[in-house]
Image (cartoon, rainbow, N blue to C red):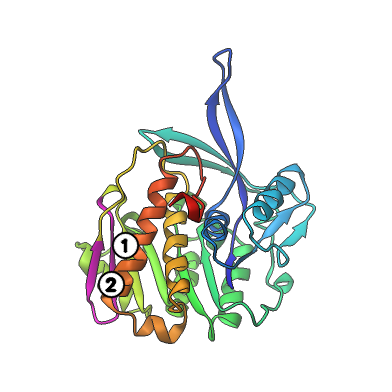
């Protein structure tokens, strides 16, 4: 089973009422939540470890997890509010304003983190849960404690507006990057992580030196490029799709990659270290295919396996 570790929140998606007024509709979301939902819909065994509110939005999130076959037994319930992310769509691209103070997700602590059961064979980390303390430190501690014997994928999905102490964040993120087997970054993420080099290839080389077996760089409509430990690069184009919005696209891409690797019994540390260019290309192509369906729908609405 893959355990996704990180935030679950409510995306407030803009709409227009019947009388022409601007409004927002609550949709379950969050980078890590979206990846878990997509994995469940693709047929992978998956669970979510998150801070989950007991409020009405927390109930909405729990219902969405159950409906997509995501195990939520490790979720940490708390009488705190759910994080809200108000979405603005600018030329189809999502921009967010977060309301996260004292939330159930943000206030998770290392002391609360449960032991990870033996049936969990892979861990996924990412999103704003890596930036907002105390939860960020709790997830970093969890990775250090539980990641040595399990395959680990990390997608920082960096949002500078959430980073209160850049030096502290960089130090924590660097520790986590060194423990990851797969690191997925957007070209914007990569420029933030490695700011002092001119070319994408130089930035990738710097990131590869930190230890991951696989680095994947996504570039929106230009597709994704994956790099193995020896520097071999493979590229897959973005799927052709009528783009409604990009909410959840990267998260769904992550799920497609993980689901493909899991189905091929390649989601282990040893298998990822020996992964071939052909197998990486196959996993990434599945990721772009799944993401292509998501961008054709409003909000983060990943496809089921039968939709593919």
Q: Is 163 one of the magenta-colored residues?
A: no
Left or right: 79, with 75 as reference point: right
- Circle 2 — which element? strand
Classify residue 233 by image quadrant: bottom left
**Range of magenta residues:** 222-235
Left or right: 17, with 258 as reference point: right
- Circle 1 — which element? strand
For the point 56% across and 44% down, which residue is it? 98
Circles 1 and 2: CB atoms closer than 8 Å: yes
Classify residue 244 by image quadrant: top left
Q: Is 226 one of the magenta-colored residues?
A: yes
Total residue callouts:
2
Q: Looking at the rendering, in which quadrant would you find the N terminus? A: bottom right
Numbered tag placed on residue 176 in the rendering: none
Closer to us: 54 or 68: 68
Closer to us: 296 or 7: 296
For the point 50% across and 67% down, which residue is it? 168
Mark 1 packing: few (<14 Cα in 10 Å), some, or many (20+)?
A: many
For the point 41% across and 40% down, which residue is it? 296
Closer to us: 156 or 122: 122
Numbered tag placed on residue 227 in the rendering: 2
- Residue 12: horizontal and vertical position, in percent? 58, 37
Left or right: 154, with 215 as reference point: right
Q: Which residue is mark 1?
A: 217
Q: Is residue 21 above or below residue 271?
A: above
- Residue 188: horizontal and vertical position, in percent? 33, 54
Instruction: Determine if residue 102 is in view.
Output: no
- Residue 58: horizontal and vertical position, in percent? 72, 49
Q: Earlier in the sequence, mark 1 or mark 2?
A: 1
In three-dimensional space, the C-alpha distance between marks 1 and 2, rounded to whole angstroms, equals: 8 Å
């Amino acid at each position: 089973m893959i355990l996704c570790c990180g935030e679950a929140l409510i995306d407030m998606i803009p709409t227009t009422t019947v009388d022409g007024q601007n409004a927002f509709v609550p949709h379950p979301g969050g980078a890590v939540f979206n990846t878990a939902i997509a994995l469940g819909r693709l047929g992978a065994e998956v669970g979510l470890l998150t801070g989950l509110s007991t409020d009405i939005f927390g109930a909405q999130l729990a219902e969405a997890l159950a409906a997509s076959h995501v195990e939520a037994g490790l979720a940490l319930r708390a009488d705190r509010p759910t994080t809200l992310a108000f979405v603005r769509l600018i030329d189809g691209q999502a921009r967010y304003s977060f309301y996260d103070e004292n939330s159930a997700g943000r206030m998770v602590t290392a002391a609360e983190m449960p032991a990870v059961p033996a049936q969990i064979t892979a861990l996924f980390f990412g999103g704003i849960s890596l930036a907002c303390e105390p939860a960020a430190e709790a997830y970093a501690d969890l990775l250090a404690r539980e990641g040595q014997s399990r395959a680990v994928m990390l997608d920082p999905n960096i949002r500078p507006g959430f980073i209160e102490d850049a030096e502290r964040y960089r130090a924590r993120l660097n520790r986590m990057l060194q423990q990851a087997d797969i690191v997925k970054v957007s070209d914007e993420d990569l420029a933030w992580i490695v700011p002092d080099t001119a070319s994408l290839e130089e930035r990738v080389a710097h990131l590869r030196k930190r230890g991951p077996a696989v680095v994947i760089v996504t570039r929106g409509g230009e597709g994704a490029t994956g790099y193995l430990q020896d520097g071999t690069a493979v590229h897959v184009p973005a799927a052709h799709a009528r783009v409604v919005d990009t909410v959840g696209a990267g998260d769904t891409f992550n799920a497609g990659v993980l689901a493909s690797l899991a189905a091929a019994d390649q989601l282990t540390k040893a298998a990822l270290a020996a992964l071939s260019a052909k197998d990486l290309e196959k996993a990434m192509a599945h990721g772009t295919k799944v993401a292509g369906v998501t961008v054709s729908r409003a909000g983060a609405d990943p496809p089921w396996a039968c939709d593919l």
